Amino acid sequence: MNEHYIWTVILVLGVGTYLIRFSFLGLIGGKDLPEWVLRHLRYTAVAVLPGLIAPLVLWPAATGGDVDPARLSAALVTFGIGLLTSNVIAAILCGGATLFGMIWVLGAY
Amino acid sequence: MSAGSEKSYYWAGFRMGMPFLLVVIPFGMLFGVVATEAGFTSFQTMAFSSVVFAGASQFAALQLMVEDAPILIVIVTALAVNLRMAMYSASLAVWLGEAPLWKRALIAYVNVDQSYAVSINRFEDEPHLTLSQRIAFFFGAVSPVCPMWVVATALGIWVGDAIPDWMALDFAVPICFLAIIAPMMRTLAHMLSAVTSIVLALLFAGLPYNLGLLIAALIAMMIGAQIEVWMTRKAGRAAS
């Protein structure tokens, strides 16, 4: 990763993100947005983030890309608790506890 | 409009924003740790958090950069993560669109998930609020969270080296994201969109230029929107 690469990403991503945030606030006409566009925008977060995380969960770099029972069960617990309680902190804590518990039980380190 | 009531709305927003610190501080620290570990200098890491100012997309960009993805893919994917903010911008514009341009420019910069969610709930619950009360509430909700994102990043840079290997920090990012994604599964459309995203991202993992995630996300988005259309139609039929 060279310096040029890093700074280009920071600046272009920064400007692009700002323009997305400013878009309708800047143009005022938030009501004018067609319904089908809004409908697609509602799903951007759930369409991008799970796909980003899935390979990291299934093929973690820490085990050289092999499926790891400790990490997989930690992921399932985190997601399950998050789904049931909608409590982000509780989900993170339970997932972390599962990860450490499993690593300790399996003696992975 | 009296300044006193604006002040009270600012603090009402502030109180609503406080609980999000529990998420923002660890998440920001994690970014500081992971970015410096990936080879960013402290200055670059701080610039990243303060210029881009959008946690999920920062992690997404970082992940792809570590994999040496082409610059265009990094930017397009990370911007896709932030596209939802266009929706925030559109729905905030309904309530705050009359504010002077410089205020709207500032609102846009701090228009993050948490401040949006809290504010839009309040605006819809109390539609009689004046414009200045709404603005006060919005900036109140933002005040605890936004500066702390940058401060937490700095903390992460600072403690980074001190974190031992056994803490399996590599997995903190997936766990944080999973915890954030899970409560988003509000409807069948959201769930099927997420499942599509996962299945296709895994299937397309081998595509060149890390294009797989982008294609998976695009299709997942259309699936979610289409299922919403079907569900609404079905609900409409059932009601009539």
Image (cartoon, rainbow, N blue to C red):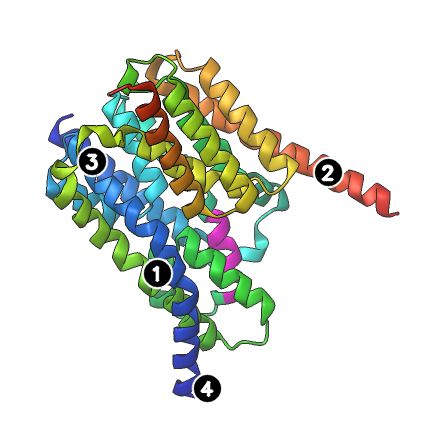
Q: Are marks 1 and 2 on the same chain?
A: yes
Spatial CA span between label 4 and label 1: 23 Å
In the rendered image, which residue does mark 1 sit on?
A: B105
User: As shown in the figure, which amino acid type bears the numbered disc 4?
Assistant: Met
Spatial CA span between label 1 and label 2: 37 Å
Residue B94 part of the magenta segment:
yes
Spatial CA span between label 3 and label 1: 28 Å
| Residue bounds of the magenta highlight | B86-95
Dot 1 lies on which element? helix
Other residues around mark 1 within 10 Å, as few (<14) / some (14–19) / many (≥20): some
Above or below, comparing residue A80 to residue A21 in the picture: above
Other residues around mark 2 within 10 Å, as few (<14) / some (14–19) / many (≥20): some
Residue B201 part of the magenta segment:
no
User: As shown in the figure, which amino acid type bears the numbered disc 2?
Assistant: Met
In the rendered image, which residue does mark 3 sit on?
A: B35
Badge 4: chain ID: B
In this rendering, does residue A42 appear at all?
no
Badge 2: chain ID: B
In the rendered image, which residue does mark 4 sit on?
A: B1
Pointer 3 and pointer 2: residues touching (CB < 8 Å)?
no
User: As shown in the figure, which amino acid type bears the numbered disc 1?
Assistant: Ala
Q: Nearer the viewer, residue A67 or B16?
A: A67
In this rendering, does residue A66 appear at all?
yes
In the rendered image, which residue does mark 2 sit on?
A: B231
The nearer-to-camera label among 4 and 2 is 2
